[in-house]
Image: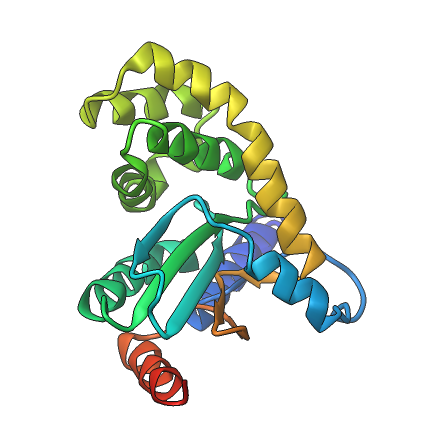
Amino acid sequence: MSAEKKFLIGIGLVTLILVAFGVFFLGKQGATPQVESATVQSVLEQQARWTKGNPDAPVKIIEFADFECPACATVNPIVQQVVAENQDKVYYSYRNYPLPSHINSKIAAQAAEASGLQSKYWEMTDLLFKKQNDWITSTNPKDLFTSYGQELGLDIEKFKSDLETSIAVVNQDYADGNKIGIQATPTFFINGEKYEGAMQKLQFQEIINKASTSE
């Protein structure tokens, strides 16, 4: 077996292991940065653009995720089901954290943001995760995202324009994630408590039940 084949097989095995553990890490060196609690609180208390549930609910879930991350795609339907089944308990918000190693992740986040400006944020989010394998290696993902916009009935000219300008809010989300020491996707903050990696429905429900009764 050639050295190149061995390397590619090794990369594939590492990817499978990461997906199995439900987490994708940012390629940072060194120890996990220490972040002041006041900084974390300040970032988490910012008004989110995309939310579900009751703002007065006792449990606040904030997810930092990457549309190109397989673990994020795996956990997305679980999160949405948990939120839908706990509308009286949970207020959920989504923030972008496109890992630099994922070449199409940022433009995917921009596509979701642009769709949100036409009230189709969650619909585009679901499409991006469901069709992840179709666009992650594309050399021209904008064409695919435009076709998704057509599927959702968007004003395509507006979508194309907003796709470009949405880079600012995506970059701000990423900067906020760095401020509070995000190292992997998905990362959840549940009432301020940090959880890294995809979780099963039962795990989410146990955390929600505990957090809601401790309020």
Q: Position of residue 98 (x, y in %)?
A: 55, 45
Res 126 → quadrant = top left
Q: Nearer the viewer, residue 4 or 58?
A: 58
Q: Quadrant of the C terminus?
A: bottom left
Report the residue at 64% width, 60% height from top. 42
Seen from this angle, which residue lies furthest top?
157
**Camera sees residue 164:** yes
Q: Is residue 104 left or right of residue 119?
A: right
* 58 in relation to 45, above or below: below
Q: Nearer the viewer, residue 143 or 163?
A: 163
Res 135 → quadrant = top left
Q: Position of residue 26 (x, y in %)?
A: 64, 56
Q: Is residue 150 left or right of residue 35?
A: left
**Camera sees residue 27:** no
Q: Nearer the viewer, residue 208 or 41?
A: 41
Q: Position of residue 63 (x, y in %)?
A: 46, 59
* 169 in relation to 209, above or below: above
Q: Quadrant of the N terminus?
A: bottom right
Report the residue at 35% width, 10% height from top. 157
Report the residue at 29% width, 43% height from top. 122
Q: Position of residue 117 (x, y in %)?
A: 36, 28
Res 173 → quadrant = top right
* 82 in relation to 212, above or below: above
